[in-house]
């Protein structure tokens, strides 16, 4: 049977917006005006530290380093992230996939140690046949490693898998893995230029396993 592979942040929970809004709040407190358009394309990858460092320098000069900014963000972001609900359509999509006999995997940059309790709180801790995190593969998105590992864990060839993502690096990684990809952008990434091969929906409520099965999307 086919495989369905989901990202987590920005797709299952609105964490990208949460982080982005806290970043904008902290920057505003430093007298810096910024917008989603300046950094939305960087979300979804663990391989963009240099790009973030350059952006922080552009915003703040030498007043603060990336590490120092992270230290300000972390205590503000974590409590908010831990309270986020599932986004609309997630439960339904997961349920449809399981009912149809699809293998279902989660491929995420989240730390596995913190991920488990969050999935349990959200009621989806038993929804996945496999979970692969960025720390368990050699390269993060946009490299295909995490999606190839997820397909392997499901026992499926990449060509039999559909990835649902919210970020540009995630879409690029899925396509590089030879998989079909559906993009459901968050408000942070909605302005980005996604690969033309990615099918786009505005909400997971628009996506059904039946549509994927019969090529209607």
Image (cartoon, rainbow, N blue to C red):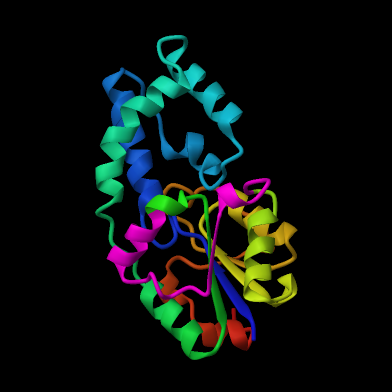
Assess whether residue 191 is covered by the magenta stretch: no
For residue 195, say whether it is visible: no
State the residue at coordinates (63%, 49%).
141
Q: Report which quarter residue 206 is drawn in.
A: bottom left
Q: Report which quarter residue 89 is drawn in.
A: bottom left
State the residue at coordinates (66%, 62%).
149
> Considering only vertical position in the picture, is 198 above or below 20?
below
Identify which residue, 198 or 110, lies in the foreground.
Answer: 110
Residue 81 picture location, percent across and down: 31, 49
Q: Report which quarter residue 147 is drawn in.
A: bottom right
Q: Left or right of 140: which side holds 97?
A: left
Q: Left or right of 58: which side holds 151?
A: right
Identify which residue, 191 or 75, lies in the foreground.
Answer: 75
Residue 172 picture location, percent across and down: 67, 54
Q: Quadrant of the N terminus?
A: bottom right
For residue 126, say whether it is visible: yes
> Considering only vertical position in the picture, is 173 above or below 37?
below
Identify which residue, 178 or 183, lies in the foreground.
Answer: 178
The residues colored magenta run 115-141
Q: Quadrant of the C terminus?
A: bottom right
> Considering only vertical position in the picture, is 198 above or below 156?
above
Residue 211 picture location, percent across and down: 55, 84
Residue 92 picture location, percent across and down: 39, 80
Assess whether residue 137 is covered by the magenta stretch: yes
Identify which residue, 185 or 139, lies in the foreground.
Answer: 139
State the residue at coordinates (28%, 61%).
85
């Amino acid at each position: 049977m086919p495989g369905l592979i989901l990202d987590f942040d920005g797709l299952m929970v609105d964490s990208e917006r949460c982080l982005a809004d806290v970043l904008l709040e902290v920057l505003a407190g430093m007298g810096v005006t910024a917008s989603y358009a300046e950094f939305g394309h960087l979300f979804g990858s663990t391989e963009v530290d240099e790009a973030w460092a350059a952006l922080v320098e552009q915003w703040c000069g030498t007043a603060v380093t990336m590490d120092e900014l992270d230290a300000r963000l972390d205590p503000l972001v974590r409590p908010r992230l831990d309270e986020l609900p599932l986004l609309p359509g997630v439960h339904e999509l997961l349920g449809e996939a399981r009912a149809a006999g699809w293998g279902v995997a989660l491929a995420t940059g989240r730390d596995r140690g913190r991920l488990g309790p969050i999935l349990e709180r959200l009621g989806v801790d038993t929804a996945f046949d496999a979970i692969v995190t960025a720390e368990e593969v050699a390269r993060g998105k946009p490299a295909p490693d995490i999606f190839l590992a997820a397909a392997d864990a499901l026992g499926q060839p990449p060509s039999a898998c559909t990835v649902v993502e919210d970020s540009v690096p995630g879409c690029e990684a899925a396509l590089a893995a030879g998989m079909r990809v559906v993009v459901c952008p968050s408000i942070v990434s909605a302005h980005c230029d996604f690969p033309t091969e990615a099918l786009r929906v505005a909400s997971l409520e628009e996506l059904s396993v039946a549509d994927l099965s019969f090529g209607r999307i």
